[in-house]
Image (tube, rainbow, N blue to C red):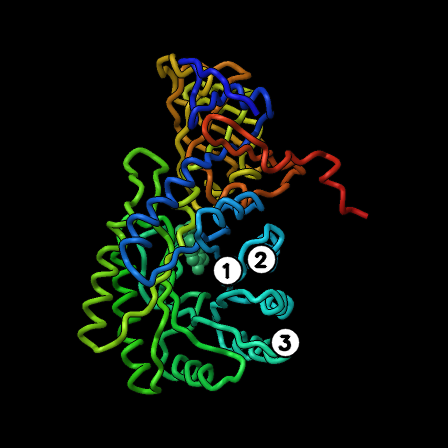
Amino acid sequence: MKTKIVTKKHFEFYGCDTVELAREYGTPLYVMSEDHIIERCNEIKEDFLQKYENTRAVYASKAFLTKEMCRIIKREGLGIDVVSGGELYVAIKSEFPMEKVIFHGNNKTFSELELAVENNVGRIVVDNLYELEMLNNIASEFDKKMEILFRITPGVDSHTHKFISTGQLDSKFGIPLDEEILYGAIYKAIQMPNIELKGFHFHVGSQLFENTSHLKALEILINLMKEAKERVGFETRELNVGGGFGIYYKNGDERAKLRDFMDPIMECLKSECREFNLSIPQVIIEPGRWIVGEAGITLYRIGSIKKIPGVRTYVGINGGLPDNPRPALYDAKYEAVVANKMDEENEDIVTIAGKCCESGDILIWDLEVPRLTPGDILAVKSTGAYNYSMASNYNKIPRPAVVMVKDGQERVIVKRETYEDLIAREI
Ligand SMILES: *Cc1c(COP(=O)(O)O)cnc(C)c1O
């Protein structure tokens, strides 16, 4: 850990010389900025938590989860949400306060729920009736009362890629807005001895730049709150409106301002609750990508440069799909710079190809770059969310290290995988 002098030729990321980082820690390398994460947490505090009473914010840990990330989020005072036993285990191992953990998932297993009950996880977001029964039984065995929300499928479409849109009626997530199913579930939950229903949850999608889907879903949920009170006397005390706030990936994007997203939601909730004579529930948000997406970059070393005359130039990097599957999964777009040639003009248009045996392993199509030579360092931006957490060992490629940067100083928070790691569990 040492402070480095950044030269103008080199791409600087939060006070660190990325070429030096690549040299020191090798490539591919995930570099994360703790300063950026703290800035986002501060925006959440200023524009949401301190502005509105009875609110909470949890970090959707599936975006990027390590023990160190848990410690940062804990120090910043936010909660986290987890979607599997494995994510919950990381939270437990980092001594994250369990009352601030929210457990999601459309098919939680018996052992995952058992782990959650055993560790007194603060909220379980129940997705279906099967889960509700199972949770009540487990809680009764532990002689505990678990506080839950129901995940509701609000039946709204969000303007984003089909695979990251979650709130439409035809969805694998949540309880559909079907009278019989929904009120059956509510009625059942409020009578269960080891369950305490606190309210509802919805999550409409991801990488959204406007809140129209959130507002539509909110209208539906307020209606549900009103009906649930009239029909079964159930008073909603918590409303979790999910995450999905968009960030900058490429030219034309602008990271959503939290207040632009949340102010109209809070206004709408307040006025409609007043109108329907409902008490205002606690509001919870769950941003993932918005907190860590722009906090991360990935550094690669350029190898082969293949010019197909009259067609295109393929530039090979020493990573790709295994460390960032998003372009192949969702056609995600990224921007990149040549970190060691920041003082040179762009002269060529090239296609950045990953090193996997898949034609679909193309990281960036048609990127403008200076004249390249093998050994150059490519820095791909906005890779903090859903990169490390989605990484695989396809083609037996070891996963990169993760370096966390703060105040111009870096520290390794995840070691690079070795070939030995790749066979460590093989018999
Ligand atoms: C993925 C997810 C989030 C976070 O989504 P982002 O787009 O990363 O903000 C929040 N809530 C739930 C239930 C999720 O599944």
Res. 142 mark = 3
Determine the CA span between mark 2 and mark 1.
8 Å
Q: What residue did someone put label 2 on? A: 88
Query: Pointer 2 and pointer 3: residues touching (CB < 8 Å)?
Result: no
Q: Earlier in the sequence, mark 3 or mark 1?
A: 1
Q: Is residue 67 above or below residue 57?
A: above
Query: Pointer 2 and pointer 1: residues touching (CB < 8 Å)?
Result: yes
Q: Earlier in the sequence, mark 2 or mark 3?
A: 2
Q: What residue did someone put label 1 on? A: 101
Q: Nearer the viewer, mark 2 or mark 1?
A: 1
* Residue 169, picture quadrant: bottom left
Q: Nearer the viewer, mark 2 or mark 3?
A: 3
Is 262 left, or right, of 381 in this rendering? left
Ligand 1 quarter of the rendering: bottom left
Q: Is residue 275 above or below residue 205?
A: below
Amino acid type, mark 2: Leu
Q: Indicate the position of residue 94 as horizontal and vertical percent values.
A: 59, 50
Could you tell me which secondary element the residue under label 2 belongs to? helix
Residue under the image location 39 percent in, 45 percent down: 41
Determine the CA span between mark 3 and mark 1.
19 Å
- The local crowd at label 3, few if under 14, some if 14 to 19, many if 20 or more residues have their Cα within 10 Å, is few
- The local crowd at label 2, few if under 14, some if 14 to 19, many if 20 or more residues have their Cα within 10 Å, is many
Q: Is residue 143 above or below residue 265?
A: below
Amino acid type, mark 1: Val
Query: Pointer 3 and pointer 1: residues touching (CB < 8 Å)?
Result: no
Q: Indicate the position of residue 158 as horizontal and vertical percent values.
A: 32, 57
Note whether ligand 1 is within 8 Å of mark 3.
no
Could you tell me which secondary element the residue under label 1 belongs to? strand
